[in-house]
Amino acid sequence: MAVFHLEPGAIRKYMFGLSAVYWALIFSAWVGYPKDHHYSIMTHTFSFLGSWADKHSPQWWWLFSVGMVTWGLGMLPVTLYLRKRLSAVSPWASWVFGFLYVVGGFGIALVGVFPDAPGEIVAGAGYTWTKVHAKVAVSAFAGFFLGNLWMGAMLLLDALWLRRMEDAGSARFQYTTLLWPYLFWLPILCTGIGFLVRWEYVYAAKKAAAAAAGASIGSSWSEAMNTRYSFPLWENILIYTLFLFLVWVVTALTASDPDA
């Protein structure tokens, strides 16, 4: 298939097709989520769309799993293409990037394989679906987070000193086209992390005040719901922005590819 030959036009069409399939599945999972369970990004994590728990989506949870596996495994050709383009800056550094993105992609796929749902994977083994889900979700975030920062560092180094991608690219290549995705993604990422870290201090103060007044207070998780400190809110936003970032970077690089 042409897409595995890393042709820029095929990769761009492939990324758009992957996006369409993935978001169609996620939208279908959202439509299938029972209305009386009131799914909201203010109170429900993205993964709750794929939970078979009675309080979530016991009938259509599998649509989410199929979507996540599709996105995760579907990132492999895209990763190979991005690694190839970045190899102009540094071959060894491009392989580090590729490794991080593969970790992220497989983490995304495993989020679908291990839903955030009740029960043990193997009875008596002590590994619950939710615990394994949490671990693979962290690996997915870490892979793409570190991969994006690594790619950004490579591009910044090249733009300031090396100029290798410019030399290897077409006349259409401009470093600023790759700056915009980062100016979109990084502020949102930092804002989300900032609010989540800030909440630890806000909740500690609320808890101390409640104790001093002899009043009860809910858990850190429940107290943050429906506020700007809500973890589900920022998890959802960061997933949406990550996907937009990926599409933006792929579009920018394929449009300026000398083989395009």
Image (cartoon, rainbow, N blue to C red):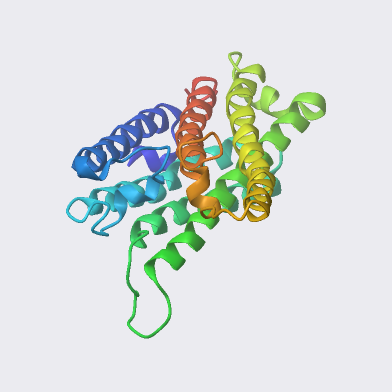
Give the residue furthest to the left. 59
User: Residue 3 appears in which quarter of the rendering?
Assistant: top left
Furthest-right residue in view? 161
Nearer to us in this view, 160 or 120: 120
The percent coordinates of residue 17 (x first, y second) are 31, 32
Question: Which residue is at the far front?
Answer: 214
Q: Residue at x 57, y 53 (%)?
A: 215
Residue at 43% x, 61% y: name it.
Answer: 133
Which residue: 54% across, 53% down? 217
Image quadrant holding the N terminus, namely: top left
Left or right: residue 211 versus residue 16 is right
State the count of labels: 0
Residue 29 can be seen in this image: yes
Tell me where residue 68 appears, x and y as whole percent.
Answer: 35, 49
Above or below, comparing residue 173 to residue 233 in the picture: above
On screen, 16 above or below 94?
above
Q: Position of residue 19 (x, y in %)?
A: 35, 34
- Near-viewer residue (89 or 144): 144
Could you tell me residue 120's position as x and y percent?
35, 75
Q: Is residue 23 left or right of residue 148?
A: left
Indicate whether 22 appears above or below 158: below
Instruction: Report the front residue among 139 and 218.
Output: 218
Please tell me in which quadrant of the rendered image residue 195 appears.
top right
Could you tell me if residue 88 is visible in this image?
no
224 or 190: which is nearer to us? 224
Left or right: where 216 falls relative to 106: right
Task: Specify the farthest residue to the top.
Answer: 171
